[in-house]
Amino acid sequence: MDVTRRRFLEATAAGAAIAPAIGASPASKLPTRPFGKTGMTVSILGFGSGSRFLMYREEDRALDALNRAIDLGITYIDTAHAYGNGQSEERIGRLMGARRKEVTLATKLPGRKADDARRQIELSLKRLRTDHLDVLHIHDLKSLDDLAAIEAPDGVLKALYEARDQKVARAIGITCHASPSALKAALERHDFDATQMGLNAALARMSDAPGGMKATPMPEGGFEELALPVAVRKRMGIVAMKVFGQEQLIGSAAPEKLLAYSLSLPVSLASCGMPRPEFIEKNAEVARHFEPMSAADRRKLTESISAAKKVSLGAFLSDHADA
């Protein structure tokens, strides 16, 4: 086993060993973990506010759902500038007057030019009714070519550094659905505080390759093997997303096992879309009583998911936009 792989496995084991104890909350709340080296502490379950939040068609029901999530101790709120053409941020903003101090608020920018990103930041702050963001991500890194646009002299990365320097954002990061090699390069090259990536029991056995992500007999080349070790080494706040594979993995494995799988990795939290109130209650209950899965049990869960399902999920995510 090479040194990098060994160190990553050791970090995973250490993270899993301390996961239940870190920031343990009262029974009515959720366990918490440090958000990397940012100084922030977050609930291990985050409220994903993309397409699943927008499935609450009535505004009052959406706000009730978000209020309930916060009441249960889900304090990381994950949204994006483009979700619902701003509807997600606007909904969240309606609660921030009363609840801003209780949450870690994260949004994501679709723009690739610095000027576009600056305008998007201003609009997001207005929608969210806040004067600062706790986490500001570049949204959906797609490829190495996309990374080149991001890091160009007039690229969005410049605007993120400015936002952090000006205290508009406490932490900056980048998200990725389906290009582990591009995310690995981004995290290695740049001074990010945080990252968000697809981490689930199916993607653990995927590799980045021409033509998309493919199932492989050995777990090499996926987010867990490429990008996650870099984020761990650089002590970033790490958000696992696509825990349920946009519901595509429901049926292949029990939801509570899928959530436990992702939380057993060396991450700060798992962000989940929860389009029905009972999903909020159930996921909060799983998080409250979370116990890490062993490496053997994680491997067993991964191997129980068919190669066809993994390939299908990889293809879906390669052209996915949770808007």
Image (cartoon, rainbow, N blue to C red):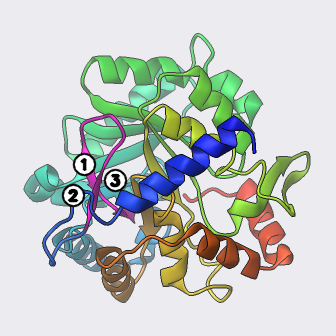
Residue 144 versus residue 119: which sits nearer the camera? 144
- Compared across the picture, whether 69 is left or right of 234 comes to left
Residue furthest to the top in view is: 153
* Residue of label 3: 89
On residue 78, which mark appears?
Answer: none
* Crowd rating for badge 2 (residues with CA inside 10 Å; few <14, some 14–19, many 20+): some
* Eye-nearest disc, 3 or 1: 1
Spot occupied by residue 276 in the image (x, y as percentages of width and height): 39, 84
Q: Quadrant of the N terminus?
A: top right
Marks 2,1: beta carbons within 8 A: yes
Q: Position of residue 110 (x, y in %)?
A: 54, 39
In percent of the image, x 43 and y 24: which residue is there?
160
Q: Is residue 116 visible?
A: yes
Mark 3 or mark 2, earlier in chain: 2
- Is residue 141 visible in the rendered image? The answer is no
Mark 1 crowdedness (10 Å alpha carbons): few <14, some 14-19, many ≥20? some
Q: Is residue 26 left or right of residue 271?
A: left
For marks 2 and 1, the one nearer the N-term is: 2
Let me know if residue 178 is in the magenta part.
no
Mark 3, secondary structure of its residue = helix
Examine the rendered structure and indicate whether residue 206 appears above or below residue 183. below
Residue kind at label 1, given as amino acid type: Thr
Q: Amino acid at mark 2?
A: Gly
**Residue 317 falls in image quadrant:** bottom right
On the image, the x and y values in percent for residue 67 come to 20, 71
Q: Which residue is mark 2?
A: 23
Front in this rendered view, residue 314 or 49: 314
- Quadrant containing the C terminus in the rendered view: bottom right
Over which residues does the magenta segment extend? 31-49
Instruction: Point out which mark residue 41 bears.
Output: 1
